[in-house]
Amino acid sequence: MHPHRWKIRAKLFASRFWQPTSACMTAMPGSWGQIWNLLHWSIALKTGLFTALLAVLLSFTPAARLYGQRLGNALAIGCLTAVGDTYSHLSQRPEAGTAGLHWGEVLATGAISALLALAGSYVFEDRARRLRTLWSRLTA
């Protein structure tokens, strides 16, 4: 495997880590009131880590073509985040099982992550051209 591909996968891992983690911190009930709660952060970080690992594994399959399209990328990351959030919540309280899982929260986390991925694709495309243009206008 080419080192260039691993560099792309490392970048993919980083971007797919922050989106689900941020989405999970936003979608959990009482998110902003519990911003310093360690349990809250552990679930969010676990969601981000698991989702990023799934995204990298998906990059080895033909489904990796979804990453090249804005909406396909958003859909893929939204679904992977929902899976990652389900895993992180079930691993936190395995005795509750799927009956104790808040499915609305899982779906909301996936939707927020998809929106973050879609917004990120516009903001950070072409080496963050839009951000650089905005910054040059603000500082000129």
Image (cartoon, grey):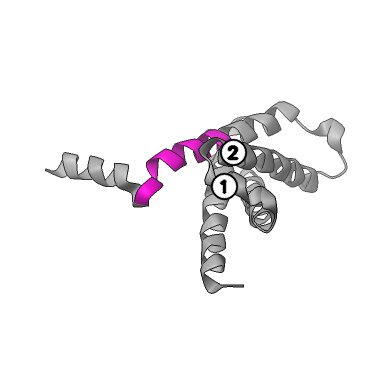
Q: Residue at x 51, y 39 (%)?
A: 70
Callouts 2 and 1 close, C-beta under 8 Å: yes
Q: Is 115 within the magenta?
A: yes
**The C terminus sits in image quarter:** top left
Front residue of 38 and 83:
83
Q: Nearer the viewer, residue 67 or 117?
A: 67
Residue 13, percent across and down? Answer: 57, 57
Q: Position of residue 69 (x, y in %)?
A: 53, 41
Q: Which residues are magenta?
A: 113-126
Task: Out of 22 and 83, give the one closest to the viewer.
Answer: 83
At label 2, which amino acid type do we have? Gly
Q: Amino acid at mark 1?
A: Tyr
Instruction: Name the residue beneath numbered marker 2.
Output: 72
Q: Quadrant of residue 107?
A: top right
The Cα atoms of the two marked residues, 2 and 1, are separated by 6 Å
Q: Which residue is mark 1?
A: 67
Residue at position x 82%, y 32% from top? 100
**120 left or right, relative to 68:** left
Q: Residue furthest top?
A: 104
Identity of the residue drawn at 15% across and 44% down: 139
Up/down of 127 relative to 8, above or below: above
